[in-house]
Amino acid sequence: MYKIAVIPGDGIGKEVMEAALTVLDALNLDFEYEFGEAGDECKEKNGIPLPQETIDIVKKSDACLFGAAGETAADVIVRLRQEMDLFANLRPVKSYPGSNGLFDDLDFMIVRENTEGMYIGKEEYIKDESGNIIGATAERLITRYASKRICEYAFKYAKDNGRKKVTGVHKANVLKKTDGLFKEVFYEIAKKYENEKIEAEDFYVDATAMYLLTRPQSFEVIVTTNLFGDILSDEGAGLVGGLGLIPSANIGEKSALFEPVHGSAPDIAGKGLANPTAMILSAIMMLEYLGEKEMAIKLDKAILKVLSDGETVTADLGGNATTTEMAEAIKNEIS
Ligand code: ATP
């Protein structure tokens, strides 16, 4: 039995979560759901966007499914990442039929370090003698510990998922100390995987941004620091289609949280227009994390069928099905 924390959140988060749970039901897994509140609505009701009770639910769970939060997204998701030490952010770049992406033959994973780098929140103003702000600085932290942990994760992911190459992305020619250390650790870990026949290569982040457009098929697993990973994974999303199709995972040593990349989309909330695919693909990532590979494949096949038929898909994919209708179609494919 798995304990799954479910946080639908705001706006379309609630709709796509309902769709994902409908589809998961069809797999007859031994899941016990515990629902938690978080987000804008929760703040309105309880005065805070992320109550301790919700954090406790997530901490006690084997995995967490998260829908979306509106204005309070940073307070909710950043806090959860910190509380749970969710150090790896996984963003698959995978082409699905009917998505109108730039490429229809991509399938690689971006593994982004989630806890340090440019996002440690240490910024300072530089002031002149009269106290006028004349500049600002930001601190960028790269530790051997976090670099090792994320590179280990990327190589192990490659090994477990039949991938043959890991690309380390950095800017060590300019950021000599911080990214110099990251690159050094990357190759230390790579050495340990030589026997597994997993190739290691490294590129500067600017070159990678170009290669993602000119030869994205050459990537299998990319591992990189926080800010670079944030930017490259959005570029990756742009390669394979709209926001309604992009899932993500935040993985820690003890727990993990799975969420679509899109937000609460207030413009379409409550209208049944939300594409549930990103949330369902996030649930597939959760199944893989829990070791339920067969179920993950079964659900992936069902989504592929519904997307390639193109009949029961939401408006963003050119169809006229509602969120619920699309989820039902996927559920029917499973059965
Ligand atoms: P938030 O403030 O919560 O981030 P947002 O509207 O600024 O919300 P997103 O929710 O990420 O940002 O979405 C941007 C736009 O993309 C939405 O307004 C919506 O039109 C479209 N969109 C996002 N997710 C989906 C989805 N699942 N299905 C269909 N359209 C979507």
Image (spheres, rainbow, N blue to C red):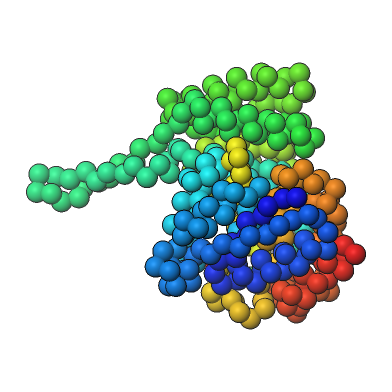
Q: Residue at x 53, y 45 (%)?
A: 84
Q: Quadrant of residue 154?
A: top right
Asked whether residue 330 appears in the rendered view, the answer is: yes
Q: Quadrant of residue 310?
A: bottom right
**Along the viewing direction, whichever of 5 and 15 lies nearer the viewer:** 5
Q: Residue at x 20, y 50 (%)?
A: 133
Residue pushed farthest right? 335
Q: Residue 146: percent from the left, percent from the top?
A: 51, 31
**Along the viewing direction, whichever of 107 and 34 lies nearer the viewer:** 34
**Along the viewing direction, whichever of 51 and 207 lies nearer the viewer:** 51
Asked whether residue 232 appears in the rendered view, the answer is: no
Q: Residue at x 72, y 68 (%)?
A: 19
Up the image or down, 242 lies above or below 201; here it is: below
Q: For the image shown, how many numbered marks are present on the structure?
A: 0
Q: Residue 147: percent from the left, percent from the top?
A: 53, 30
Q: Is residue 311 left or right of residue 222?
A: right
Up the image or down, 275 lies above or below 248; here it is: below
Q: Is residue 66 left or right of residue 143?
A: right
Check the picture and name the quadrant holding the C terminus. Answer: bottom right
Q: Residue 198: percent from the left, percent from the top?
A: 74, 26
Q: Residue at x 60, y 37 (%)?
A: 253
Q: Residue 94: percent from the left, percent from the top?
A: 73, 51
Up the image or down, 125 lies above or below 280; here it is: above
